[in-house]
Image (spheres, rainbow, N blue to C red):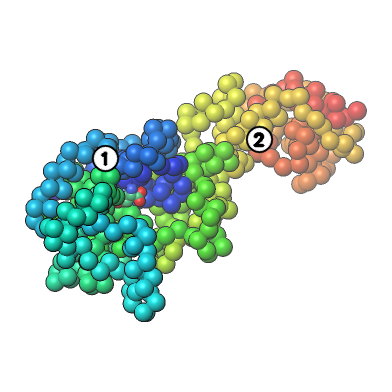
Protein backbone atom coordinates (compact mmCIF):
# COMPACT_ATOMS: atom_id res chain seq x y z
CA UNK A 1 0.00 0.00 0.00
CA UNK A 2 1.40 3.40 -0.96
CA UNK A 3 1.15 5.94 1.83
CA UNK A 4 -0.55 9.12 0.65
CA UNK A 5 -0.86 12.29 2.74
CA UNK A 6 -2.32 15.62 1.83
CA UNK A 7 -1.87 19.18 2.95
CA UNK A 8 -5.26 20.82 2.49
CA UNK A 9 -5.19 24.57 3.04
CA UNK A 10 -8.05 26.87 2.13
CA UNK A 11 -6.64 29.62 -0.08
CA UNK A 12 -8.47 32.32 1.87
CA UNK A 13 -5.34 33.82 3.42
CA UNK A 14 -1.60 33.40 3.86
CA UNK A 15 -0.28 30.30 5.60
CA UNK A 16 0.83 30.85 9.17
CA UNK A 17 3.31 28.85 11.19
CA UNK A 18 0.63 26.40 12.36
CA UNK A 19 -0.30 25.60 8.73
CA UNK A 20 3.36 25.32 7.78
CA UNK A 21 3.81 22.80 10.55
CA UNK A 22 0.88 20.73 9.23
CA UNK A 23 2.44 20.79 5.75
CA UNK A 24 5.82 19.76 7.17
CA UNK A 25 4.39 16.87 9.23
CA UNK A 26 2.48 15.55 6.21
CA UNK A 27 5.58 15.80 4.03
CA UNK A 28 7.86 14.17 6.62
CA UNK A 29 5.52 11.26 7.18
CA UNK A 30 5.05 10.66 3.44
CA UNK A 31 8.81 10.77 2.87
CA UNK A 32 9.47 8.55 5.88
CA UNK A 33 7.17 5.94 4.35
CA UNK A 34 8.30 6.31 0.75
CA UNK A 35 4.83 7.67 0.02
CA UNK A 36 3.24 10.57 -1.77
CA UNK A 37 2.48 14.06 -0.49
CA UNK A 38 -0.37 15.96 -2.16
CA UNK A 39 -1.31 19.61 -2.07
CA UNK A 40 -5.07 19.88 -2.02
CA UNK A 41 -6.56 23.34 -2.32
CA UNK A 42 -9.81 23.49 -0.35
CA UNK A 43 -11.27 26.26 -2.47
CA UNK A 44 -15.01 25.54 -2.40
CA UNK A 45 -15.60 28.92 -0.80
CA UNK A 46 -15.54 30.89 -4.04
CA UNK A 47 -16.15 34.22 -2.33
CA UNK A 48 -13.17 33.98 -0.02
CA UNK A 49 -10.70 31.93 -2.08
CA UNK A 50 -8.19 33.95 -4.09
CA UNK A 51 -5.70 32.98 -6.79
CA UNK A 52 -3.13 35.20 -5.11
CA UNK A 53 -3.33 32.99 -2.01
CA UNK A 54 -3.08 29.84 -4.16
CA UNK A 55 0.14 31.24 -5.64
CA UNK A 56 1.41 32.20 -2.19
CA UNK A 57 0.74 28.68 -0.84
CA UNK A 58 2.70 27.15 -3.73
CA UNK A 59 5.53 29.63 -3.12
CA UNK A 60 5.56 28.84 0.60
CA UNK A 61 5.90 25.11 -0.09
CA UNK A 62 8.60 25.78 -2.69
CA UNK A 63 10.53 27.95 -0.23
CA UNK A 64 10.35 25.18 2.34
CA UNK A 65 11.50 22.71 -0.31
CA UNK A 66 8.40 20.52 0.16
CA UNK A 67 7.46 19.79 -3.40
CA UNK A 68 4.07 18.10 -3.69
CA UNK A 69 3.77 14.91 -5.71
CA UNK A 70 0.47 16.17 -7.03
CA UNK A 71 -1.97 19.06 -6.72
CA UNK A 72 -5.76 18.90 -6.53
CA UNK A 73 -8.40 21.59 -6.31
CA UNK A 74 -11.82 21.14 -4.83
CA UNK A 75 -13.31 23.71 -7.22
CA UNK A 76 -12.47 21.33 -10.08
CA UNK A 77 -14.35 18.46 -8.45
CA UNK A 78 -17.84 19.87 -7.96
CA UNK A 79 -19.38 17.28 -10.31
CA UNK A 80 -17.93 14.48 -8.16
CA UNK A 81 -19.41 16.04 -5.05
CA UNK A 82 -22.78 16.37 -6.73
CA UNK A 83 -22.80 12.68 -7.62
CA UNK A 84 -21.88 11.60 -4.12
CA UNK A 85 -24.38 14.05 -2.68
CA UNK A 86 -27.21 12.45 -4.65
CA UNK A 87 -26.20 9.01 -3.50
CA UNK A 88 -26.29 10.09 0.14
CA UNK A 89 -29.65 11.86 -0.29
CA UNK A 90 -31.05 8.68 -1.86
CA UNK A 91 -29.67 6.67 1.06
CA UNK A 92 -31.33 9.01 3.55
CA UNK A 93 -28.03 10.16 5.04
CA UNK A 94 -28.50 13.77 3.92
CA UNK A 95 -31.69 15.68 4.61
CA UNK A 96 -32.95 19.13 3.77
CA UNK A 97 -33.50 21.62 6.56
CA UNK A 98 -35.13 25.02 6.25
CA UNK A 99 -34.40 26.89 9.45
CA UNK A 100 -32.97 30.35 9.11
CA UNK A 101 -29.83 31.24 11.10
CA UNK A 102 -32.04 33.35 13.41
CA UNK A 103 -34.38 30.43 14.11
CA UNK A 104 -31.44 28.15 14.84
CA UNK A 105 -29.91 30.74 17.10
CA UNK A 106 -33.11 31.09 19.08
CA UNK A 107 -33.38 27.32 19.55
CA UNK A 108 -29.81 27.13 20.72
CA UNK A 109 -30.47 29.83 23.29
CA UNK A 110 -33.54 28.04 24.55
CA UNK A 111 -31.62 24.78 24.96
CA UNK A 112 -28.77 26.52 26.73
CA UNK A 113 -31.28 28.28 28.98
CA UNK A 114 -32.58 24.87 30.02
CA UNK A 115 -29.08 23.65 30.68
CA UNK A 116 -29.12 21.35 27.65
CA UNK A 117 -26.39 20.96 25.02
CA UNK A 118 -27.21 23.24 22.08
CA UNK A 119 -27.38 20.55 19.40
CA UNK A 120 -29.73 20.51 16.45
CA UNK A 121 -33.08 18.90 17.34
CA UNK A 122 -33.62 17.25 13.93
CA UNK A 123 -36.92 19.07 13.51
CA UNK A 124 -36.39 18.96 9.73
CA UNK A 125 -36.50 15.15 9.78
CA UNK A 126 -40.12 15.37 10.91
CA UNK A 127 -41.27 17.51 7.99
CA UNK A 128 -43.76 15.88 5.64
CA UNK A 129 -43.64 16.29 1.88
CA UNK A 130 -46.42 18.84 2.25
CA UNK A 131 -44.54 20.80 4.91
CA UNK A 132 -41.52 20.97 2.65
CA UNK A 133 -43.59 22.02 -0.33
CA UNK A 134 -45.14 24.77 1.75
CA UNK A 135 -41.76 26.03 2.89
CA UNK A 136 -40.45 25.99 -0.67
CA UNK A 137 -43.55 27.88 -1.79
CA UNK A 138 -42.63 30.54 0.77
CA UNK A 139 -39.37 30.91 -1.15
CA UNK A 140 -37.23 29.00 1.32
CA UNK A 141 -34.36 26.91 -0.04
CA UNK A 142 -32.96 24.09 2.06
CA UNK A 143 -29.51 23.63 3.43
CA UNK A 144 -28.44 20.02 3.94
CA UNK A 145 -27.47 18.11 7.02
CA UNK A 146 -25.68 14.81 7.40
CA UNK A 147 -27.75 12.43 9.54
CA UNK A 148 -25.42 10.88 12.09
CA UNK A 149 -26.13 7.26 12.93
CA UNK A 150 -26.83 7.35 16.65
CA UNK A 151 -26.46 3.57 16.89
CA UNK A 152 -22.95 3.49 15.45
CA UNK A 153 -20.48 4.58 18.12
CA UNK A 154 -17.75 6.83 16.80
CA UNK A 155 -14.27 5.55 17.53
CA UNK A 156 -10.84 5.66 15.96
CA UNK A 157 -7.32 4.99 17.04
CA UNK A 158 -5.54 8.28 16.56
CA UNK A 159 -1.86 7.92 15.62
CA UNK A 160 -1.02 10.71 18.07
CA UNK A 161 -3.89 10.89 20.56
CA UNK A 162 -4.56 7.18 20.93
CA UNK A 163 -8.09 5.71 21.15
CA UNK A 164 -10.85 8.28 20.63
CA UNK A 165 -14.56 7.79 21.32
CA UNK A 166 -17.54 10.04 20.73
CA UNK A 167 -21.23 9.52 21.30
CA UNK A 168 -22.94 10.42 18.02
CA UNK A 169 -26.12 11.35 19.89
CA UNK A 170 -24.21 14.11 21.62
CA UNK A 171 -23.22 15.71 18.33
CA UNK A 172 -25.60 17.71 16.17
CA UNK A 173 -26.08 16.63 12.57
CA UNK A 174 -23.60 18.84 10.73
CA UNK A 175 -24.61 21.13 7.88
CA UNK A 176 -22.68 20.04 4.79
CA UNK A 177 -24.19 22.20 2.09
CA UNK A 178 -25.62 25.69 2.15
CA UNK A 179 -28.95 26.83 0.72
CA UNK A 180 -27.13 28.41 -2.24
CA UNK A 181 -25.68 25.00 -3.12
CA UNK A 182 -22.16 25.82 -1.94
CA UNK A 183 -20.24 23.26 0.11
CA UNK A 184 -18.92 23.38 3.61
CA UNK A 185 -15.59 21.72 4.10
CA UNK A 186 -16.61 18.45 5.82
CA UNK A 187 -18.11 16.30 3.07
CA UNK A 188 -15.96 17.31 0.06
CA UNK A 189 -12.93 16.58 2.21
CA UNK A 190 -14.11 13.02 2.84
CA UNK A 191 -14.96 12.51 -0.84
CA UNK A 192 -11.49 13.73 -1.79
CA UNK A 193 -9.77 11.58 0.80
CA UNK A 194 -11.56 8.55 -0.65
CA UNK A 195 -11.01 9.41 -4.33
CA UNK A 196 -7.37 10.38 -3.79
CA UNK A 197 -6.68 7.22 -1.75
CA UNK A 198 -5.42 9.25 1.19
CA UNK A 199 -4.08 6.82 3.78
CA UNK A 200 -3.20 9.30 6.54
CA UNK A 201 -4.89 12.54 7.50
CA UNK A 202 -2.44 14.61 9.52
CA UNK A 203 -3.79 17.86 10.90
CA UNK A 204 -4.19 19.96 14.02
CA UNK A 205 -6.27 18.82 16.98
CA UNK A 206 -8.75 21.60 16.26
CA UNK A 207 -10.10 19.12 13.69
CA UNK A 208 -10.86 16.31 16.15
CA UNK A 209 -14.57 17.11 16.24
CA UNK A 210 -14.65 17.21 12.43
CA UNK A 211 -13.03 13.79 12.36
CA UNK A 212 -15.76 12.48 14.66
CA UNK A 213 -18.46 13.22 12.08
CA UNK A 214 -16.24 12.46 9.10
CA UNK A 215 -15.67 8.88 10.28
CA UNK A 216 -19.40 8.32 9.79
CA UNK A 217 -19.21 9.92 6.34
CA UNK A 218 -16.54 7.43 5.28
CA UNK A 219 -18.81 4.66 6.55
CA UNK A 220 -21.78 6.14 4.66
CA UNK A 221 -19.73 5.78 1.46
CA UNK A 222 -18.66 2.27 2.46
CA UNK A 223 -15.07 3.43 2.53
CA UNK A 224 -12.48 2.56 5.15
CA UNK A 225 -11.39 5.75 6.91
CA UNK A 226 -7.76 6.82 6.67
CA UNK A 227 -5.55 6.82 9.74
CA UNK A 228 -5.94 10.12 11.59
CA UNK A 229 -3.11 11.90 13.38
CA UNK A 230 -4.10 15.06 15.21
CA UNK A 231 -1.14 17.08 16.40
CA UNK A 232 -1.45 19.18 19.55
CA UNK A 233 -1.63 22.86 18.73
CA UNK A 234 1.25 25.30 18.77
CA UNK A 235 1.57 27.82 21.52
CA UNK A 236 3.81 30.84 21.71
CA UNK A 237 6.93 30.93 23.86
CA UNK A 238 4.89 32.29 26.75
CA UNK A 239 2.96 29.04 26.71
CA UNK A 240 -0.33 30.52 25.58
CA UNK A 241 -2.11 30.40 22.25
CA UNK A 242 -0.88 33.61 20.80
CA UNK A 243 -2.20 35.93 18.18
CA UNK A 244 1.33 36.50 17.00
CA UNK A 245 1.65 32.90 15.79
CA UNK A 246 -1.27 33.49 13.47
CA UNK A 247 0.62 36.33 11.83
CA UNK A 248 3.94 34.56 11.31
CA UNK A 249 4.42 33.23 7.80
CA UNK A 250 7.25 32.59 5.38
CA UNK A 251 7.60 36.31 4.56
CA UNK A 252 8.41 37.06 8.16
CA UNK A 253 10.86 34.16 8.51
CA UNK A 254 12.61 35.09 5.28
CA UNK A 255 12.82 38.75 6.36
CA UNK A 256 14.55 37.89 9.61
CA UNK A 257 16.98 35.52 7.91
CA UNK A 258 15.50 32.17 8.94
CA UNK A 259 16.49 29.32 6.64
CA UNK A 260 13.72 26.93 5.58
CA UNK A 261 15.77 24.02 6.94
CA UNK A 262 15.77 25.65 10.39
CA UNK A 263 12.01 26.06 10.37
CA UNK A 264 11.57 22.44 9.30
CA UNK A 265 14.04 21.16 11.90
CA UNK A 266 12.18 23.01 14.65
CA UNK A 267 8.62 22.27 13.54
CA UNK A 268 9.44 18.59 12.99
CA UNK A 269 10.48 18.17 16.60
CA UNK A 270 8.60 20.54 18.91
CA UNK A 271 5.84 18.72 20.73
CA UNK A 272 7.73 15.42 20.37
CA UNK A 273 9.95 13.47 22.73
CA UNK A 274 12.89 13.93 20.34
CA UNK A 275 15.31 16.82 20.91
CA UNK A 276 15.31 19.80 18.56
CA UNK A 277 18.56 19.41 16.61
CA UNK A 278 20.25 21.43 13.84
CA UNK A 279 19.54 18.84 11.16
CA UNK A 280 19.91 20.67 7.86
CA UNK A 281 18.81 17.79 5.66
CA UNK A 282 15.04 17.27 5.92
CA UNK A 283 15.47 13.75 4.54
CA UNK A 284 17.29 12.86 7.78
CA UNK A 285 14.42 14.27 9.82
CA UNK A 286 12.03 12.20 7.73
CA UNK A 287 13.98 9.02 8.44
CA UNK A 288 13.43 9.37 12.17
CA UNK A 289 9.85 10.62 11.93
CA UNK A 290 7.31 8.73 14.01
CA UNK A 291 3.87 9.79 15.30
CA UNK A 292 4.54 7.77 18.44
CA UNK A 293 7.01 10.49 19.45
CA UNK A 294 4.33 13.18 19.54
CA UNK A 295 2.86 14.17 22.87
CA UNK A 296 -0.54 15.57 23.66
CA UNK A 297 0.74 18.71 25.35
CA UNK A 298 0.82 21.84 23.20
CA UNK A 299 4.01 22.33 21.21
CA UNK A 300 5.86 25.45 22.26
CA UNK A 301 7.07 27.57 19.35
CA UNK A 302 9.83 29.89 20.50
CA UNK A 303 11.31 32.37 18.05
CA UNK A 304 14.50 32.65 20.11
CA UNK A 305 14.96 28.89 19.86
CA UNK A 306 14.38 29.14 16.11
CA UNK A 307 17.00 31.89 15.77
CA UNK A 308 19.57 29.82 17.70
CA UNK A 309 18.81 26.74 15.62
CA UNK A 310 19.03 28.83 12.47
CA UNK A 311 22.57 29.93 13.30
CA UNK A 312 23.61 26.31 13.72
CA UNK A 313 22.04 25.44 10.37
CA UNK A 314 23.74 28.41 8.64
CA UNK A 315 27.10 27.12 9.95
CA UNK A 316 26.55 23.96 7.91
CA UNK A 317 25.48 25.47 4.58
CA UNK A 318 27.75 25.09 1.58
CA UNK A 319 28.70 28.02 -0.59
CA UNK A 320 26.59 26.71 -3.48
CA UNK A 321 23.52 26.75 -1.25
CA UNK A 322 23.89 30.44 -0.46
CA UNK A 323 25.90 31.94 -3.35
CA UNK A 324 22.88 33.66 -4.89
CA UNK A 325 22.36 35.56 -1.64
CA UNK A 326 25.98 36.69 -1.18
CA UNK A 327 27.79 39.67 -2.72
CA UNK A 328 28.68 38.44 -6.24
CA UNK A 329 32.43 38.42 -5.69
CA UNK A 330 32.24 36.56 -2.38
CA UNK A 331 33.71 33.13 -3.05
CA UNK A 332 33.68 29.83 -1.17
CA UNK A 333 36.85 30.65 0.80
CA UNK A 334 35.35 33.90 2.12
CA UNK A 335 32.03 32.18 2.89
CA UNK A 336 33.77 29.43 4.82
CA UNK A 337 35.90 31.97 6.70
CA UNK A 338 32.94 33.97 8.00
CA UNK A 339 30.29 31.24 8.22
CA UNK A 340 31.02 30.16 11.83
CA UNK A 341 30.27 33.71 13.00
CA UNK A 342 26.91 34.18 11.33
CA UNK A 343 23.42 34.11 12.73
CA UNK A 344 21.96 34.67 9.27
CA UNK A 345 23.27 34.36 5.71
CA UNK A 346 22.67 38.08 5.15
CA UNK A 347 25.31 38.93 7.76
CA UNK A 348 27.97 37.42 5.47
CA UNK A 349 27.81 40.61 3.39
CA UNK A 350 28.89 42.66 6.41
CA UNK A 351 32.05 40.58 6.76
CA UNK A 352 32.62 40.74 3.02
CA UNK A 353 32.68 44.52 3.35
CA UNK A 354 35.19 44.14 6.17
CA UNK A 355 37.39 42.01 3.91
CA UNK A 356 37.12 44.38 0.97
CA UNK A 357 37.28 47.57 3.02
CA UNK A 358 37.53 50.34 3.58
CA UNK A 359 37.16 49.62 7.29
CA UNK A 360 36.64 52.21 9.91
CA UNK A 361 39.36 51.72 12.46
CA UNK A 362 38.35 52.59 16.00
CA UNK A 363 40.71 54.68 18.12
CA UNK A 364 43.38 52.22 19.29
CA UNK A 365 45.88 53.36 21.90
CA UNK A 366 48.60 51.12 20.68
CA UNK A 367 50.02 53.04 17.72
CA UNK A 368 53.64 51.97 18.15
CA UNK A 369 52.77 48.31 18.30
CA UNK A 370 50.59 48.62 15.19
CA UNK A 371 53.28 50.54 13.30
CA UNK A 372 55.66 47.73 14.17
CA UNK A 373 53.05 45.20 13.01
CA UNK A 374 52.79 47.01 9.67
CA UNK A 375 56.53 46.59 9.18
CA UNK A 376 56.46 42.91 10.14
CA UNK A 377 53.51 42.37 7.82
CA UNK A 378 55.59 43.67 4.93
CA UNK A 379 58.28 41.07 5.61
CA UNK A 380 56.42 37.83 6.31
CA UNK A 381 55.57 35.10 3.82
CA UNK A 382 51.96 35.64 2.74
CA UNK A 383 51.64 32.46 0.77
CA UNK A 384 50.87 30.02 3.59
CA UNK A 385 49.50 31.16 6.94
CA UNK A 386 50.12 34.90 7.28
CA UNK A 387 48.24 35.29 10.58
CA UNK A 388 50.47 32.82 12.39
CA UNK A 389 53.53 34.23 10.69
CA UNK A 390 52.55 37.77 11.74
CA UNK A 391 51.59 37.01 15.32
CA UNK A 392 54.53 34.61 15.76
CA UNK A 393 57.02 37.26 14.68
CA UNK A 394 55.35 39.94 16.81
CA UNK A 395 55.27 37.70 19.85
CA UNK A 396 58.98 37.11 19.53
CA UNK A 397 59.78 40.76 18.94
CA UNK A 398 57.58 42.24 21.68
CA UNK A 399 57.10 39.48 24.25
CA UNK A 400 53.33 40.13 24.06
CA UNK A 401 50.87 37.33 24.28
CA UNK A 402 47.12 36.71 24.45
CA UNK A 403 44.81 39.65 24.14
CA UNK A 404 47.59 42.25 24.10
CA UNK A 405 49.12 40.51 21.12
CA UNK A 406 45.93 39.81 19.15
CA UNK A 407 43.25 42.37 19.94
CA UNK A 408 44.96 45.52 18.57
CA UNK A 409 45.67 43.61 15.37
CA UNK A 410 42.09 42.45 15.02
CA UNK A 411 40.79 45.97 15.68
CA UNK A 412 43.14 47.54 13.17
CA UNK A 413 42.56 44.91 10.51
CA UNK A 414 38.79 44.55 10.79
CA UNK A 415 37.52 47.50 12.80
CA UNK A 416 35.80 45.02 15.16
CA UNK A 417 36.78 43.53 18.50
CA UNK A 418 35.12 40.22 17.61
CA UNK A 419 34.61 38.27 14.47
CA UNK A 420 35.68 35.33 12.38
CA UNK A 421 38.93 33.51 12.96
CA UNK A 422 41.73 35.89 11.91
CA UNK A 423 43.74 33.02 10.42
CA UNK A 424 40.91 32.53 7.92
CA UNK A 425 40.21 36.20 7.41
CA UNK A 426 43.70 37.63 6.95
CA UNK A 427 44.55 35.83 3.67
CA UNK A 428 41.28 37.21 2.29
CA UNK A 429 42.09 40.75 3.39
CA UNK A 430 45.46 40.22 1.71
CA UNK A 431 48.88 41.75 2.07
CA UNK A 432 48.35 45.24 0.65
CA UNK A 433 45.13 46.02 2.44
CA UNK A 434 46.44 44.55 5.70
CA UNK A 435 49.62 46.64 5.63
CA UNK A 436 47.64 49.77 4.79
CA UNK A 437 45.22 49.18 7.65
CA UNK A 438 48.00 48.55 10.16
CA UNK A 439 49.85 51.63 8.97
CA UNK A 440 46.72 53.75 9.26
CA UNK A 441 46.20 52.54 12.85
CA UNK A 442 49.87 52.97 13.60
CA UNK A 443 49.61 56.68 12.97
N1 LIG B 1 -9.14 23.16 4.60
C1 LIG B 1 -9.09 22.60 5.92
C2 LIG B 1 -8.31 23.54 6.81
O1 LIG B 1 -7.51 24.30 6.29
C3 LIG B 1 -8.41 21.27 5.83
C4 LIG B 1 -8.38 20.47 7.04
C5 LIG B 1 -7.94 19.05 6.75
O2 LIG B 1 -6.74 18.83 6.74
O3 LIG B 1 -8.77 18.23 6.48
O4 LIG B 1 -8.50 23.56 8.01
Circle 2 residue = 423
Residue 158 horizontal side relative to residue 115, left or right: left
Image quadrant in which you'd find residue 100: bottom left
At label 1, counting other C-alpha atoms closer than 10 Å, the crowd grade (few under 14, some 14-19, many 20 or more) is many
Query: Which percent across, then down, holds residue 358?
Result: 76, 24
Residue corresponding to mark 1: 74
Q: How many marks?
A: 2
Q: Residue at x 21, y 51 (%)?
A: 136
Does label 1 point to a residue whose CB lies under 8 Å from ligand 1? no
Q: Could you classify mark 2 by the number of other residues whose Cα lies within 10 Å: few (under 14), some (14-19), or many (20 or more)?
A: some
**Quick check: 221 left or right of 238?**
left
Residue 224 in percent (x, y) is at 13, 56
Provide residue 439's location: percent of width, then percent of height.
84, 25
Relative depth, front residue between 10 and 273:
10
Name the quadrant of the C terminus: top right
Q: Is residue 241 left or right of residue 68?
A: right
> Helix, strand, or loop for circle 1?
helix
Q: Nearer the viewer, residue 167 or 258?
A: 167
- Who's the residue at 32% across and 40% down the image? 43
Residue 152 versus residue 392 in the image, above or below: below
Above or below for 118 versus 427: below
Nearer the N terminus, badge 1 or badge 2?
1
Amino acid sequence: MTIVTRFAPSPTGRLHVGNLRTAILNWLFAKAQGGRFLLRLDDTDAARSEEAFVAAIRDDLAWLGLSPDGEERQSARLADYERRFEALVAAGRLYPAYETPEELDLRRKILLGRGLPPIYDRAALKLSDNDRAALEAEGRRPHWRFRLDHDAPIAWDDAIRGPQRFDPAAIGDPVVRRADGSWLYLLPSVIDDIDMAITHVVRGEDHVSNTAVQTQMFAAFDAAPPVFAHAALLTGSEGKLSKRLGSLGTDHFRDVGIEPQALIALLARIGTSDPVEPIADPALLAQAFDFARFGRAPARFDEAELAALNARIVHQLDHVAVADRLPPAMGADAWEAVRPNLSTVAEAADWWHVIEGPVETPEIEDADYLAQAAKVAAEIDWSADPWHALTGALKEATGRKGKALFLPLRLALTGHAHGPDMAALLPLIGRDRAIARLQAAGG
